[in-house]
Image: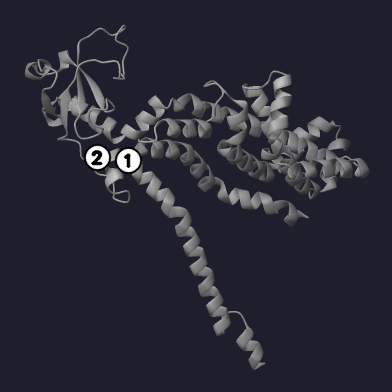
Amino acid sequence: MRSARVAAPGGGFGYLAGKIVSYVVFIAWTLITVIPLVWMLYSSFKSNEELTMDIYALPHDLFDNRNDEYVVINRELDVVLDYDPEVDTRERLLIESTTIAPTRRLMVFALLKQDLPTEIANLKAGDHLRVSQLPPRMQSRINWQTIWFNFRSAFVRGRLIGKFINSIIYASVSTFFIVLLGLMLGFALSKMGFPRISGLVGGLIGLGYLISINSVIIPLFLMLSMIKLTDSHLGIILVYVAFGLPLSVLLSTQFIRGLPDSLIESAYIDGATVFRTFASLIIPLSIPVAVTVAIISALGIWNEFLLVLVLASSEFTISLPVGVFSFSSLTSTQLGWQLAALVIAVLPVMIVYFIFNRRIAQGVVAGSIKG
């Protein structure tokens, strides 16, 4: 009896030591995962000069910009304007920061002369002024655009908006068909009453789960080239759906198999067709597994890199991860821009995961619990 009490949970040195080790490992793993993300987030608000001097310091220059000094410059070919001079012909005063990327024509503002005091509007190239000398409205504009300098540069110079939209298209459309077709196949394999055929088809689909995109990327490229689907949204979506279906079918089959047969038989007795039963009964009852498959598929497609890198060759079809890679390769000296681009790519994934992480666990175990 005494030995049994010592070995019982909640007592004994071994149990306490195991609990401490578990917590230490959990905390260490959390820190290893979270600290780089936190550093990337706050470093995306640092100027390139700050990142070069002290990579771990908190951001300062982009936030404390009320007294930043600017120099008046002439309009040149390397100056990127935020307006179309052929459409808007009003006179502007071009100023460039002397503290953030000086002489590189990166932090440049075009101020309407008609909104400036006369003494500032008449400044010539080479003259200096401070942000605090400008009208309050211009100060506020320069303040906010300076804080978000890295993100503005990533979106504008990296043209990430189009790539962001492409990633949304790939993730949303592919996920929709992966979930829908997965539920349809899961319903057929688990409730249609053809055990041998269902076993054969299920085995072939399960085999597809073992094949990765990386291992067949060259045959995929050659096959899509033959049918003229490379560098197209349709071709990329078809591949995503094909490689996402095995997991969807496996999870959906397991979940739907656990649903009572009496529900489906009652629907047939009431005169419902197979498609009506699927739409009105199976889909509503399979929401937990559908949400799980949708989250897993969408996150995987959003982060996928190699397929789009190989199959897409134009700005019209490139996704965000490939766009961030290309942008980082072209701006290797602008660390702030690269970090901002990475935040743009990672932040949507983190938001989706933190919102739906419990749904993922619930959907994965739902089938086994029902069984």
**Nearest the eye: 197 or 325:** 325
Quarter placement of the C terminus? bottom right
The amino acid on which the numbered mark 2 sits, given as a three-letter code, is Phe
Q: Secondary structure at mark 2?
A: loop
Q: Secondary structure at mark 1?
A: loop
Q: Which residue is mark 1?
A: 45
Tell me where residue 191 appears, x and y as whole percent. Answer: 85, 42
Residue 184: x %, y % from top left: 78, 35
**In the figure, residue 97 lies in which quadrant?**
top left
- What is the x, y in percent for residue 238? 69, 28
- Does residue 222 lie above or below 343 as drawn? above
Asked if residue 249 is positioned above or below residue 127 in the image, the reply reads below
Residue denoted by label 2: 63
Instruction: Tell me what residue is drawn at x 56 percent, y 39 percent.
Output: 303
Give x and y (percent) for residue 150.
Answer: 34, 34
Q: What residue appears at the point 31 percent right and 32 percent down from the top-left corner?
A: 149
Asked whether the residues under the numbered discs 1 and 2 touch, taking CB atoms below 8 Å apart as contact, a structural biologist would say: yes
The one nearer the camera, 174 or 292, is 174
Q: Can residue 320 be seen here? A: yes
Q: Could you say which is closer to the camera, residue 335 or residue 139?
A: 335
Q: CA distance from mark 1 to mark 2?
A: 8 Å
Q: Residues within 10 Å of mark 2 (few under 14, many from 20)?
A: some
The quarter of the rendered structure image containing the N terminus is bottom right
Between 184 and 304, the one lying in front of the other is 304
Q: Amino acid at mark 1?
A: Phe
Above or below, 26 against 155 in this view is below
Q: Residue furthest left?
A: 119
Q: Which mark is residue 329?
A: none
